[in-house]
Image (cartoon, rainbow, N blue to C red):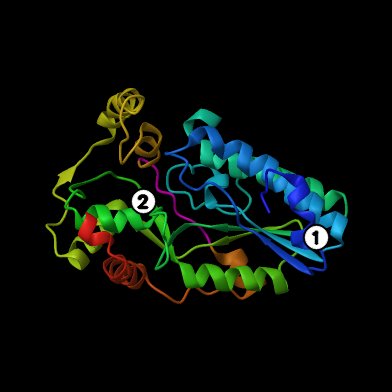
Amino acid sequence: GDILQPQTLAPAVEGVRWVFHAAARSDYWRHPEDVVRTAVEGTRNVLAAARQAGVERVVLTSSVAALGVPRRGELLTEEHDFNLKPAQFPYGYAKSRAEGEAREACRQGLEVVIVNPSVILGPGDIHLISASLVLEAHRGRAILWTDGGINIVHIEDVIRGHLLALDRGRSGERYILGGENLTHRQVFETLAEIVGRRKPWLHLPGCLIPPLAAALDLLGRFVELPLNGGQLRMSRHHLFYDLSKAESELGYRPGRSFRQAAEETYTWLREQGFLKRA
């Protein structure tokens, strides 16, 4: 079915006990205009169809993006809410709104568990969402770093986390499915080692990010760029996460390192011919 066409969803959920709703536009920098509608209306439609079909439980794939940004030195948890303007981070705003639809469905009697994966890396990323990190490093473009950081998790750990949420998660609750908290410098230095390129050598100080981000916003209106202003602004933050709730309630334990995820992604990109096109 098409999640934006409610009439197509009833056959898809007929006789189904459980639904994993992971359909969304993740390439928000490519199609920002579609992100919110797909997340909000699509989630509302899927949950309505599930409720009408008598589905026992839905696992909604949200994102850590829905948790907003932290104060300095703070680890983000499931208790944090989106705290940016929608235009600053459309994807995070969209995921936050989708979670609102899930909470409303819970109030109407449907069991919904929310999972919030961090940056997912691993083989099979055919749309080159997170795999673009590895591809850009292969192209020799990972030359600089900012002072922030991200959390990266292997796709296999995220899959296992979804199954644990289905089995053990509490309805109406959200669970962070993360991996390692890493600075941007750690990420790009590791990628450079894996792809055999020079390590990043240029540090971009925080004071230069606002004017550069504004320039990217302007240029992005005319040409497609690998990075937009919103992404550059977000790179100032240490987007680090506390996994203790998922660990204690679900038994979630990420078992694969960032390096393993990056190496497997690089191998997959080579096998699929993406490196030849780079």
Magenta region, main secondary structure:
loop
- Label 2 belongs to which residue? 149
Q: Is residue 118 left or right of residue 99?
A: left
Q: Residue at x 47, y 37 (%)?
A: 31
Q: Quadrant of residue 165?
A: bottom right
- Label 1 belongs to which residue? 111
Mark earlier in primary sequence (1, 2): 1
Q: Nearer the viewer, residue 224 or 145?
A: 224
Q: Residue at x 36, y 51 (%)?
A: 149
Amino acid marked by disc 1: Glu
Q: Nearer the viewer, residue 222 or 235?
A: 222
Crowd rating for badge 1 (residues with CA inside 10 Å; few <14, some 14–19, many 20+)? many
Query: Of helix, strand and loop, which one carries label 1?
Result: loop
Residue 38 percent location from the top left of the image:
62, 42
Q: Which corner quadrant holds the N terminus?
A: bottom right
Residue 61 visible, this angle: yes
Amino acid marked by disc 2: Gly
Question: How far apart are the alpha carbons under marks 1 and 2?
Answer: 34 Å
Query: Of helix, strand and loop, which one carries label 2?
Result: strand
Q: Which residues are magenta?
A: 236-242
